Image: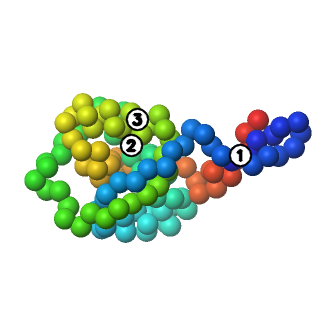
Amino acid sequence: MWKIHNGKLIQTTDESRIRYKTRMSAAIINSLKQLAEKYDTHIGYLLENGYSNLIDSGSIVYDKKNRPKDRIEFRTTCDKELLDSLKEFAKDHSLNLNDVIEASVAYINYEDVKHANWRYRVEV
């Protein structure tokens, strides 16, 4: 992100974001790649939108017996507070974080996702 400091633009790191890794279904990752390309965004922004919508809904239905068998490691970034809220949500519902992350894909609102250029925003 960029900040205006003393009338000059200075590039800075967004301290509110955190890097994390998880294990997700390869099929879900591939579909998210296609959706990210279609909506001109990034997979991380799609997931963030799903996380916040899932937390807002307050409930989740997940069958642990139907876990995908094709999970691979996936790394991205997310808003630190949102990720902490998602971890708490998973804990409250007695689920693994990976399960909640995969379930959040169904809660993505594609019309309300951050644009790919969001990380280049200018803040005062």
Estimate the spatial distance between the alpha carbons at disc 1 and disc 3, rounded to whole Å.
Answer: 23 Å
Which residue sits furthest right? Answer: 7
Tell me where residue 108 appears, x and y as whole percent: 39, 49
Q: What residue do we see at 48% from left, 62% from top?
A: 36
Answer with mark 1 or mark 2, whichever residue precedes in sequence: 1
Which tag, 2 or 3, sits closer to the chain's start?
Answer: 2
- Disc 1 residue crowd, few under 14, some 14–19, many 20+, Cα 10 Å: few
Viewer-nearest of discs 2 and 3? 3
Q: Give the distance between the C-alpha atoms of the residues marked 1 and 2, in whole angstroms.
A: 25 Å
Mark 3 Cα within 10 Å, few/some/many (few <14, many 20+)? Answer: few
Residue tagged by mark 1? 12
Task: Residue type at mark 2: give it.
Answer: Tyr
Tell me: 47 left or right of 119: left
Which sits in the foreground, 43 or 10? Answer: 10
Q: Are marks 1 and 2 in contact (CB under 8 Å)?
A: no
Q: Is residue 36 left or right of residue 60?
A: right
Mark 3 lies on residue: 84
Does residue 108 appear left or right of residue 92 in this picture?
A: right
The residue labelled by disc 2 is 51
